[in-house]
Amino acid sequence: MKIWIATGGTGGHVFPALSVASALAAAGHKITVSCDGRVRDMVARGMPKNGRRVHIWASGVGAKKHLSQIYALAKIGVSSGALFLRFMFSRPDRVVAFGGYASVPVVFAAHLWRIPTFLHEQNAAIGRANKFAMRWVRTLMTSFPDVAGIPAGVSANVIYTGLPVRGEFLAAANSPLCHDGRIFVTGGSLGAQILDDVVPGAIAAMHNKKIFVTHQTRPENVARLQKFYAENKIRANVLSFVHDMAARVIDADIVIGRSGASTVVELQTVGRPAILVPLGINPDQAANAAAFAKNGGGFAIEQSKFTARWLTATLDDLFDNPLRLDKMAAKAYVPNNAVEKIIAAVTK
């Protein structure tokens, strides 16, 4: 089959798309992957050997300025027309879209040619681009069993597949905690100021003085945090970038971080307790954190309630009761066979 994989403009869209693309290519299907300019190099590095890459002219329409919104919509319209003509001469058998505004022109063009189209939603609350594109797809595939915000009356079939993760996480699925007193703090690629402000002081006040902290932060905060941990005799490794995210998650007894879809599903795949502090302006992250906490794998706490006093008490209780950490790890674990489920749905 000729299968077109459409992905958006962030790593959170790209990595799951490339996981599925690679598996489909290995099964003998002809693969084309489209993306916008922001992730062109990222896609090029992870492309299947015999796959093709196509650049889509698109950007988000969430800008506050009306002219910016009009320009973004115009780019989507032009790309939709170009793809309509392309599909006239080289029509894929299936389209699989992984969200983001760069997916919308592909989904629309596929709809006009009546190509079976599948859309994947990463988060526990459907995003704006996917909500807009849902009217044109046959099947919506979800990362979480329950997804908020799906428009009423849509004809798409909704199936729970999970979210593809990198092989390093799959290799460590449901691995036991080491109980080495390790805490991994990560605010994502840009860090998170709230974590930098609250976590160090909370750890310094803990009863347990054998904690080892790996703290990923913004480059400008590295020296300050290194100094704080050293002055308080806390064993710590402060980084501005984590090269091996899977190893850090696997080694941790608990993770403190944001709640992007990829982060949450990686925690579920390995089975790691977590304290999740959703980005306040992002309802998707709040929904993801709530879904994780609902299973009993950890805590979802609003930024306004995330204080050093609360965190110290919570961490003291957990590290004083390792059996509770084990129980949380067991509840956090969710088997991940998302790639197989997505391929089964697309190729049947």
Image: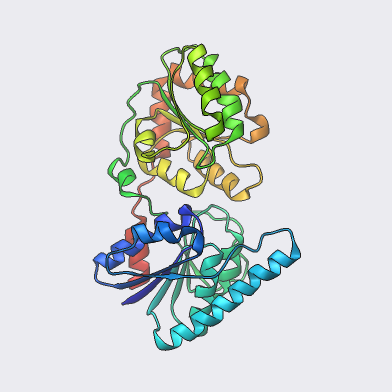
Give the position of the N terminus as an image quadrant: bottom left
Q: Quadrant of residue 54?
A: bottom left
Colour convention? rainbow
Q: Residue at x 47, y 53 (%)?
A: 12
Q: Does the image show residue 193?
A: yes
Q: In this view, does 187 lie to the left or right of 41?
A: right
Picture coordinates of residue 196, whole percent (x, y)? 57, 28
Is residue 233 depicted above or below 41 in this figure?
A: above
Q: Is residue 153 left or right of residue 175?
A: right
Picture coordinates of residue 307, whole percent (x, y)? 63, 25
Q: Quadrant of residue 80?
A: bottom right
Is residue 80 depicted above or below 118 in this figure?
A: below
Picture coordinates of residue 147, whole percent (x, y)? 54, 56
Q: How many labels does the image show?
A: 0
Q: Is residue 259 left or right of residue 88?
A: right
Instruction: Specify the farthest residue to the right.
Output: 66
Instruction: Specify the farthest residue to the bottom.
Output: 89
Q: Does the image show residue 144?
A: no
Residue nearest the observer in this picture, 106 or 225: 225
Q: Residue at x 41, y 88 (%)?
A: 89
Q: In which quarter of the image is residue 302?
A: top right
Residue nearest the observer in this picture, 333 or 58: 58
Q: Residue at x 61, y 59 (%)?
A: 149
Give the position of the C terminus as an image quadrant: bottom left
Picture coordinates of residue 216, whole percent (x, y)? 48, 33
